[in-house]
Amino acid sequence: MSRERAVSSPARQLAEDDTGASAVLITQRAPDSRRITPAGGPPAGPYRVILIATDGTAALLGAVVLAPLAQHPSLLAGFVLLVLVLLGSAGLYRLAHEQHMLDDCPPVVARVTAAWCVLTAVCVPLSLLQRISGQDLLLGCATQVVLTLLGRGLVHWRRRIALVRRPCTALLVGPEPAASRVASALQRHPASGIRVVGIVGDGAVPRRQDGATSALPLLTTVEDLRRAVIQNDVRRALLLGSAGAPQHRSWLRALAEMRCELWELDPDPSPYVPQLREPVRYLAGFRCRPLVGPRLPLRPGKRALDVVVSALLLVLAGPLLATCALWLRVSEGPGVVFRQERIGKDGRPFTLLKFRTHRPADPLESATRWSVAGDHHMPWFCRFLRRTSLDELLQLWNVFRGDMSLVGPRPERPYFVRQFTEAHPGYDERHRMPTGITGLAQINGLRGDTSIEDRCRYDNAYIADWSLWRDITILLRTAGEFFRPTGS
């Protein structure tokens, strides 16, 4: 378990005009349930299904040209499935802008030929090649290739028409001169399937008065942004420049909360292309790529580890917990358990449990005082609990209930969450994952009166590179640090 030790209060280093605990922070919630589709036009899901059906039908018709294969339905089904898997592995079901039949020709020919080679190899032990000539195999393969390309050409043609007739409403986020230039290009190129309805910026650069894009509204506040998204049914936002720019954080957070798909678009051509896993995509000639954002997959292994380890430790530490509670009750009176509101995953508050080692003068002190480590009036047993971190053992119950995790960013009070979010970029991104008793920052010495910026960086690095084994290693390293107490 982590032990945090503080000497000075960060609240004194920040604004002093707050009179109480702040409201609960609302953090960015990434659109986990939404699949990324190409930035433009109608939803790609139906067209993807039609493409799969078209490819499967073409594979079936190409195979039944060979009469002997029609007598083996299981073999036909396996062949059709193999074709779909090969075409999917080539990325042929990721629809791009202005896609044409000829664009699919090389990968389709290569994958269909490979599938027929596999089919030929499977037919050897079944003695089917004795009734099928090589000319028939070539005819079946050619028939499938032609039908596949014709079907795909028809689907791409229908989708290009839909992109022009029903363009996707979008916002441009970035400096207005560059945004105006990009908007003009998109208007001149309706096949991109994008209809720009506004420009999101700070208004620091004077507006251009030439061209048709000068009529586009300039959105300078988050309220204007939300209103434009609702009124125009905006589904996508094109970010001009880097997503990591500080001036873009508030815009990105608001757009993600409104369930808008985020794309990063390069308004200026450059020979340097970032190394990406997916092929580079283009929109009206501009290089672009989807922004996945801080969404995280479900991690049942992490929750299972939390439940098993916390339950085991609660059972093993039961006598110790009872002894500490009894001693506090006898020496300090009633109120053994200290409850305090903390901020957890997705900005949701929860009640953190600890053994009471200090009695604040009022709720304001409890919410805003950074640390009581320097309190010389604290009884020796309370100091012993804090120095050995035994006062935090009750947080195992928070872990077992699901309020926290064993490993994760340390939870903080709403007052400090708000202050640190305003002072340190990326602090609110720590709430993408459940908070924890210990974490990567704690095992690297970032406890107590240490840099909040460094803690934030370590916490986000842990979230970005999470693995179950990493949680186990952090727990083992924390157990080693437990025998070298430094206090809190």
Image (cartoon, helix red, strand yellow):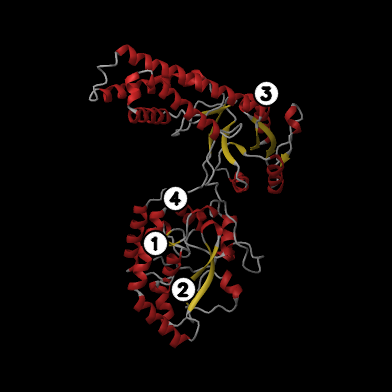
User: Considering only order in the chain, which callout, 4 or 2, is on the residue closer to the N terminus?
Assistant: 2
Please identify, in this view, whether the residue under mark 4 or under mark 3 is nearer the observer: 3
| Amino acid bearing label 3 | Arg
User: Considering only order in the chain, which callout, 1 or 3, is on the residue closer to the N terminus?
Assistant: 3
| Amino acid bearing label 4 | Ala
> Residue 188 has which mark?
3
Left or right? Give the position of 467 relative to 51.
left
Q: CA distance from mark 3 to mark 1?
A: 55 Å
Q: CA distance from mark 3 to mark 2?
A: 63 Å
| Amino acid bearing label 2 | Lys
**Residue drawn at the location 34% of the way across and 79% of the way down:** 319
- Which is nearer the eye, 361 or 466? 466
Please identify, in this view, whether the residue under mark 2 or under mark 4 is nearer the observer: 2
Expressed as whole percent of the image width and height from the top left, the position of residue 352 reads 50, 69
Q: Name the image quarter holding the C terminus.
A: bottom left
The residue carrying mark 2 is 354
Q: Is residue 484 visible?
A: no
- SS for dot 3: helix
* Residues under numbered marks 2 and 4 in contact, where contact means CB atoms less than 8 Å apart: no
**Residue drawn at the location 39% of the way across and 80% of the way down:** 324
Q: CA distance from mark 1 to mark 2?
A: 18 Å
Q: CA distance from mark 1 to mark 4?
A: 21 Å
Please identify, in this view, whether the residue under mark 1 or under mark 4 is nearer the observer: 1
213 relative to 30, above or below:
above
> Residue 306 has which mark?
1
